[in-house]
Image (tube, rainbow, N blue to C red):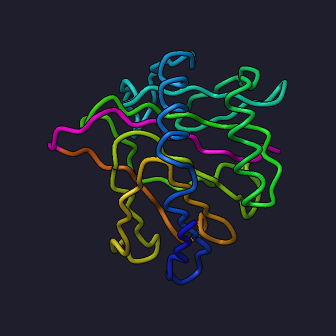
Amino acid sequence: MKIEFIDLPNAEIVYYKDFLSVKEASDYFSVFKDTVLWRQDDIKLFGKTYAQPRLTALYGDEGQRYSYSSLTMEAMPFTSEISALKRNVERITKTSFNSVLLNFYRDGKDSNGWHSDDEKELGKNPIIASVSLGAKRMFQLKNKGDGTLRRSIALEHGSLLVMKGKTQHFWKHQIPKTKKIVAPRINLTFRVIH
C-alpha cells in the first residue's frame, strides 16, 4: 500500500492511495449508490438557506447525532457493508469509529465548501478517516491563519485520507465544484462523535 505523509505545519495528514483494490472499491461504490438512504437537506449559510450541493447520509451506533450548518442528522444503524469497510479503516487507523457521514457527489456541480471538522461533538483533536469511491476529485487544504491554498490532492478511487491531531484547528478543506464532466463519487468520513 502506498503511503504519503502530507507535509503541512500543525497538521497530521496521511494519504493511502490504494487502500482498497479497484474491485473492492467498485463493489462498495455500487452497493452504497443503490442502498444508502440518501437525502438532500437544506443548510443555512450566512443567514440564507440553500439546498446542500450533494446528497448525504449518516450511519452510526444507536443514538448518534451530528450537527453542522444548522442541520442535525440522526444516525441510521450501520449496514453490514459499512461495518465491513469500517473494520478495515479501524485496522489501519487504530481507532474505533462510532459514526460515518457519507457524501454522494453526483457530478462536478456537487461540492463541499471550505470548512473544518471542528464541531464540539467531535472533541478537541478529532481523527477523520475519509474513504473515496468513484470519480477522482480534488481535495484542497488552506491555512486558517493566512487563507492561502497550500495543498491539492487528487483523491483516487479506493483511497483513504486520514486527518488527525491539530489539523482541524489550523486547516480548512474542501471539494470544489468543477466544470469538467466527472462521474459520480461517494465519500465516507468515519468519525468519533462524543
Residue 87 lies in the magenta-colored region: no
**Nearer to us in this view, 174 or 4:** 4
Residue 186 lies in the magenta-colored region: yes
Quadrant of the drawing holding the N terminus: bottom right
Task: Please state the horizontal and vertical placement of residue 57, each as a whole percent of the image.
Answer: 57, 26
Residue appearing at x 73%, y 50% in the figure: 122
Left or right? Give the position of 192 relative to 22.
right
**Among the 4 quarters of the image, the one containing residue 66:** top right
Residue appearing at x 55%, y 59% in the figure: 161
Left or right? Give the position of 146 relative to 128.
left
**Nearer to us in this view, 82 or 10:** 82
**Nearer to us in this view, 132 or 28:** 28
Seen in the picture, residue 40 relative to 109 is either above or below; the reply is: above
How many tags in the picture? 0
Residue appearing at x 63%, y 53% in the figure: 129
Task: Please state the horizontal and vertical placement of residue 98, each as a whole percent of the image.
Answer: 79, 39
Quadrant of the drawing holding the C terminus: top right
Task: Please state the horizontal and vertical placement of residue 160, each as a whole percent of the image.
Answer: 56, 55
Task: Please state the horizontal and vertical placement of residue 59, each as a whole percent of the image.
Answer: 69, 28
**Among the 4 quarters of the image, the one containing residue 110:** top left
**Nearer to us in this view, 107 or 177:** 107
From which residue to which does the magenta span run? 179-194
Left or right? Give the position of 144 relative to 72.
left
Seen in the picture, residue 104 relative to 147 is either above or below; the reply is: above
Residue appearing at x 35%, y 59% in the figure: 154
**Among the 4 quarters of the image, the one containing residue 108:** top left
